[in-house]
Amino acid sequence: MKWRVVDFEYWNAWMNMALDEAIGEAVGSGRSPSTIRFYGWNPSAVSIGCFQSIKDEVDLEACRRMGVDIVRRRTGGGAVYHDREGEITYSVIAPEEMVQKDINKAYETICGWIVDALDLMEITANIIPINDILVEGRKISGSAQTRRGGVFLQHGTLLYNISPGKMFSVLKVGCTKISDKNIASFEDRVTSILRHAKISKDKVLQELRRSFTKGKEWEAGVYTEEERRRARQLVVERYSKDEWNFSR
Amino acid sequence: MQYITAELKVKGGKLVRVRVAFDESIVFQVQITGDFFIHPEEGLDAIENVFIGMRVPPSPSEIERLVNEVVTRGNMKIMGFSPNDLAALVAGAFA
């Protein structure tokens, strides 16, 4: 079956995570093809890893003040600030057997697609296991992975034009977290595409699509009505609920 | 009921925080949070349950043995910390 590639669209935080889950269910039951989607967050949002404590990681008052939404992911990993203008998020959703069984190798493969896309933009990047991509020692991309019901999901972010000040006003980054990294400050941790190449967001998306689809049979597609309906249901049942978002 | 918290940034790994609820003799609950990965994700509940009813102060070798057991039984993969890191963190919190 051909891969489906869904072009960049904006959704809110709850719907973005619900779409990943709804697509996963449809892929798992064979009703939807393996899917690559690119998307943004409107309004800007923070997503936290499924094992994180929301109060430890997120400045809730700053989020309220700045109109930044918050959602807990189904994947592990760290808290991410998804700026409406400044980043691109991707998801790869496929039956487990289409992806390497070894978790690290699967990260390497998909993060390798991002490194290749950056290479097309003449930006040299390296994968730092488990799940980070760095340019000149600074993080430009992070990803997280889960496997449920025979379905593989990896989603991640690529920073396009980020203001570290804004990012670190909504995220609480304690000193312990960076204690093993040789960096002077939180702001030194991250970088974004525009710092390294003058390139439009559309061109970045074009290079990402080129790299993600290399060697694959694919076609451009949209979400099915069933996926949209199920995603809306998951927003109501899970992703908008304090019982989920504040569960840790 | 008393509470203690402790955190550890595993070298080359992830941040792990624990919050332990206990009285003078036993552990009632341990909550483990952080930016690590556990596959399957539901495995964290089983790991947290290991601590319930442990004598205070808990022994690091017992924690490590029991966590290793549930990880093996649940066919779990933990990325970002090891059972040994967790044992040292929880036992160290009582030191």
Image (cartoon, rainbow, N blue to C red):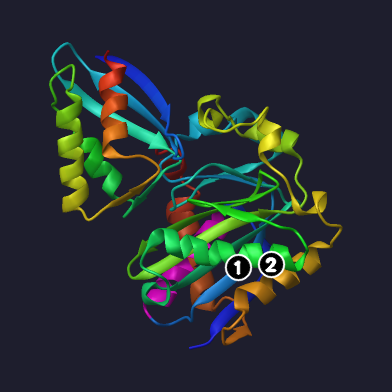
Q: Position of residue A163 (x, y in %)?
A: 76, 40
Residue extending furthest toward the right: A198
Kindly tell me whether residue A248 is visible in this rendering.
no
In this picture, residue B50 sits left or right of residue A153: left
Does residue A181 belong to the magenta stretch? no
Which amino acid, by three-letter code, is at mark 1?
Answer: Trp
- Highlighted range, magenta: A14-29
The residue pinned by badge 1 equals A113
Main secondary structure found in the magenta portion: helix
Q: Is residue B54 above or below residue B84?
A: above
In this picture, residue A19 sits left or right of residue A61: left
The residue pinned by badge 2 equals A117
Q: Position of residue A189 (x, y in %)?
A: 66, 38
Q: Tags 2 and 1 in contact by the CB under 8 Å rule?
A: yes
Q: Quadrant of residue A105?
A: bottom left
Residue that appears at 25% across and 36% down: B48
Does residue A28 belong to the magenta stretch? yes
Kindly tell me whether residue A39 is visible in this rendering.
yes
Name the image quarter holding the C terminus of chain B: top left
Q: Position of residue A8 (x, y in %)?
A: 69, 68
